[in-house]
Image: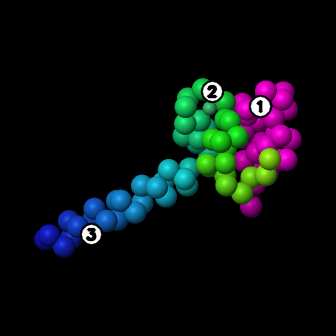
Amino acid sequence: MRFSTLSVLALLAASIPVLAQDNPNDFAAVDTDASGAISWAEVIAALPSLTEEAFAAADEDESGELSEDEYLKVLASVAP
Ligand SMILES: [Ca+2]
């Protein structure tokens, strides 16, 4: 009994960071400060392989951040 409880706890602990990073499709989850736009720091946390060039290209209004529409285009561009 004790072993199984520890196993469940270990599984939960191991899966939490994966869930946080494995959810790039959720705009609200990526916008960690809830500003309504995705900054470079926020986008890199969700999509570590994204280049600054791709970020700048997606930032169509050159606000320095990505709106939800702009972010969805980034997601489409990195999708397999
Ligand atoms: Ca933000």
Boundaries of the magenta span: 53-80
Mark 1 surroundings within 10 Å by alpha-carbon count, few (fewer than 14), some (14 through 19), many (20 or more)? some
Q: Is residue 22 above or below residue 3?
A: above
Q: Position of residue 23 (x, y in %)?
A: 56, 50
Q: Position of residue 62 (x, y in %)?
A: 84, 29
Based on the picture, tell me whether residue 57 belongs to the magenta stretch: yes
- 68 displayed left or right of 3: right
Q: Which mark is residue 36?
A: 2
How many numbered marks have been drawn onto this rendered protein structure?
Answer: 3
Residue underneath mark 3: 7
Q: Which secondary structure class fits the magenta region best? A: helix
Which of 46 and 1 lies nearest the eye of the viewer? 46
Q: Position of residue 6 (x, y in %)?
A: 23, 67
Mark 1 or 2, nearer chain start: 2
Q: Residue at 42% across / 55% down in the picture?
A: 16
According to the image, what is the colour scheme of the structure? rainbow
**Location of residue 57 (image quadrant):** top right
Mark 2 or 3, nearer chain start: 3
Cβ(mark 2) to ligand 1 < 8 Å?
yes
Tell me how far mark 1 sits from mark 2, CA to CA.
Answer: 13 Å
Q: Residue at 14% across / 70% down in the picture?
A: 2
Q: Residue at 19% across / 73% down in the picture?
A: 3
* In contact (CB < 8 Å): disc 1 and disc 2: no
Q: Say which element carries label 2.
A: loop
- 68 displayed left or right of 62: left
- Using the rendered image of the protein, determine whether residue 69 is visible from the camera's viewpoint: no
Residue underneath mark 1: 64
- Using the rendered image of the protein, determine whether residue 58 is visible from the camera's viewpoint: yes
Q: Say which element carries label 3.
A: helix
Q: Say which element carries label 1.
A: loop
Q: Quadrant of ligand 1?
A: top right
Quadrant for the C terminus in the image: bottom right
